[in-house]
Amino acid sequence: SHCMQMLLLHTRSLNVLTRFASTFLNHVELMCTHHIGAYVMQTLLEASLKYLRNPLVYTTSEQEHIEAETNGGNQQHRHGCYSSKDKLVDRKRSSATHPDALSVDEDSRMQGPTSGHDNVVLWVLAVGRFCLENIEKFVHSGVPTHVIRSVVQVLGGCYVERHLSRPQTFRKKQKTEAQKEALEVVDVPDRFDELFRTYVNTIKSFDLLGIMSNSVTSLLLQALIMVLQLKDPKMLSSLVKRIAKVVFSQSGDERGLPPAFLDPSASFTVEEMLKRCSHKSFTKLWDNHLSDILLKMSLHPVSTFCAQRVIEHATSSEQFHEMYEKLEPGFNELLDHGQASMLVCIAAACKTHSVNQARFVTALMKTLHCAEPEDRHVFLTPLILYMKRYEEYDQTHQGTAVVYQGSVLLQHLFTFGKTQKVAQSLLSMSSEALKAIACCPCGSHVLDAFVQSDQVKKASKEQLIRMLKGLYESLAMDKYGSCFVMNLWDVANMAQKVDIAEELSDKESALATSMHGRLVSKKLSLYHFIHRRNDWAELQKSKKKTSLLFQDIIKEK
């Protein structure tokens, strides 16, 4: 089956697609319900949409020969010249497919030979009608649901399978992210649109909460939402209204949250709805349902992801300000419940909407117990890095076990309009602690954000460069520290570059023994620095001019 899937996805022969389509249609029920056949069926549906997107890249060789064979078979069928085995196959085929599914196909064949393009279109319609006829039985059957999901995407003209939210291992998620492509809607035949609308109206009439709560069928609803956003926003608004009615009509638990927000599968669908709905629909959801439960959502380990989507998709700075007012009193609870990701999300929104930035930093300092007395201000950065309150913080562990959420939170803070408190706190750390952070997978990004931020003062960056003097060799030899050194080099002035290069030039042979050291040596042009100092200086000046030129171009865009 894997070989068949690879062939279908990579073929550029229309003949191959039509041969598979014709064969599968004879056994459509088996292909839709078999745990392996269904995946091949999905692949053929995806390949059909791929063909409809750009039919000109497909060859049509041997197509006339296939059509002649098909017509010959049809003539035998009409004249009754076929065996009892053929009759049995025909009976199975007619019982497995809806009578209407092949009516267009049969009419076309009776009128004359059909093109390969028509065969692909008719095959998708036939499979779509068959699945629609059996949707009540299939939608809760597991395997057939995958085929229905692909049918809906192909009829909608947009294949969104790799963009659906589902539990995955980290490695598999990385692979999926790499496979994602920009979504685009293919111009499909009008008959696809009619059948697609029928699917939408049929699914709306089902028990949506039951569909959302199932790990397989929830993906069907997610796919439908994503396709509708691109294809028919008006119909999406109608579906969102229906889902909201079902979700919020259910009585909440002792936390006051609807069951859909507490179920992992259903919450994925709610997240997709919040991300894809229109500004008007989102505002109605916020005003009528979400504003009173946002903090409660944020504290629950499942519904917190829905709360993050709410914050990320605030339609205006005024609306986000309302959200912030609901959340700030609960910062202590968020930290106690281990929901540091909510604080990261709030910081990102403060950055996006350019509101509540100073207020957020002050509230964060109070939450970490470093707002008062004033001498605790210098602990702000390390407390964020390790996501600990002042009383829990152990200075002897600086530079180790940097928390991912703390790292991302600090990166956002360095983009705020005023970064003085955070910058001063960072520079109050010891040189060894800063080196340990630079060599940490999460911590290195914090220092990258510090040196690359336009909001951090030049004097602060120069102080960091001075503090790390004598440590550049060990930084350059480290996987993450070497990346930081190269980023630091880009913002250093000429005098600072000379100091760094002089320190590392004495260690050139040691750097050559390390892959990361060689990269740093190449970036800094150490060979030229040692042997041709004037050429090195001219090279740095020309690189600086080129960098400034590109910065101006990017700013203009």
Image: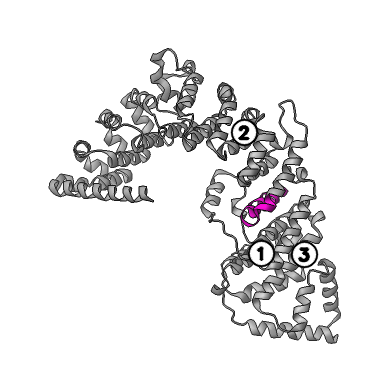
Label 1 residue SS: helix
The amino acid type of the residue labelled 1 equals Leu
- The x and y percentages for residue 507 are 22, 39
The residue at which mark 3 appears reads as: 129
The residue at which mark 2 appears reads as: 304
* Residue closest to the far top: 373
| Crowd around label 1: few <14 · some 14–19 · many ≥20 (10 Å) | many
Quadrant of the rendered structure where residue 419 is? top left
Q: Report the magenta residues as a range.
A: 215-236
Residue at left offset 56%, top offset 72%: 12
Check if residue 265 falls in the magenta segment: no
Q: Any mark on residue 162, and which?
A: none
Left or right: where 432 falls relative to 326:
left
- The x and y percentages for residue 34 are 74, 59
Of callouts 1 and 3, which one flags the residue occurring earlier in the amino acid sequence? 1
The residue at which mark 1 appears reads as: 45
How far apart are the two marked residues, 2 and 1, measured between alpha carbons? 36 Å
From the viewer's side, name the closer residue of 82 and 118: 118
Label 3 residue SS: helix
Does the image show residue 333? Answer: yes
Quadrant of the rendered structure where residue 306 is? top right
Of callouts 2 and 3, which one flags the residue occurring earlier in the amino acid sequence? 3
Check if residue 235 falls in the magenta segment: yes
The amino acid type of the residue labelled 3 equals Arg
The amino acid type of the residue labelled 2 equals Thr
| Crowd around label 3: few <14 · some 14–19 · many ≥20 (10 Å) | many
